[in-house]
Amino acid sequence: RAVALLQAMSQDALVPDVVAYSSALTACEKVGRSHQALQLLRDMQAARVAPDVVAYSSVVSACGKAGQPDRACELLSEMRRRGLAPDTTVTYTAAIAACSRTGRAEEAWHRTPWLTARPSLHALGPGERRRRKTCLG
């Protein structure tokens, strides 16, 4: 429904802003539509609306929930190239959770070399949480 409202804005000659796009992206993330979120992000960029941390975080999370860790990590890198600082609690945790869901939690730690704070153990699967607790203290 949020995507339909975004499309209706364009049809009514209204120009969606970063807040409108971010709201639609968050809606896509909440209902598990990662492909639609990725397309909306590209549409947003094509419309010359600069995605912010909220927009990217929603798409990273959507990709994570869809088991697309490579895409989630690519988006993290894209954010950094655009000069955006990913939110440690939300964005990194979503990317690490994506890797954990696909059995690649250890890879997540290596794919986020700029990570300075430890992400929440809630991002990791139960087995990985137990292992990390013993390793990390």
Image: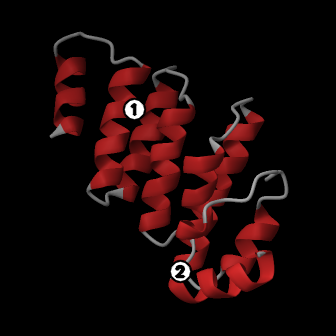
User: Residue 2 at x, y = what percent?
Assistant: 21, 36
Left or right, 119 with respect to 56, comes to right
Q: How many marks?
A: 2
Q: Hey, which residue is sitting farthest front in the picture?
A: 137
Q: Amino acid at mark 1?
A: Ser
Q: Quadrant of residue 82?
A: top right
Q: Residue at x 61, y 61 (%)?
A: 120
Q: Secondary structure at mark 1?
A: helix
Q: Amino acid at mark 2?
A: Gly
- Residue 22 - label: 1
User: Residue 27 at x, y = what percent?
Assistant: 28, 44
* Above or below 17: residue 117: below
- Residue 125 - label: 2
Q: Residue at x 39, y 48 (%)?
A: 37
* Above or below 128: residue 50: above
Q: Residue at x 72, y 48 (%)?
A: 77
* Above or below 127: residue 52: above
- Residue 132 - label: none
Q: Quadrant of residue 24?
A: top left
Task: Characterize the local packing of mark 2: few (<14), some (14-19) or many (20 or more) Cα atoms within 10 angstroms.
Answer: some
Left or right, 12 with respect to 69, comes to left
Are circles 1 and 2 on residues that touch, CB within 8 Å?
no
Question: In which quadrant is the C terminus drawn?
Answer: bottom right
Q: Secondary structure at mark 2?
A: loop
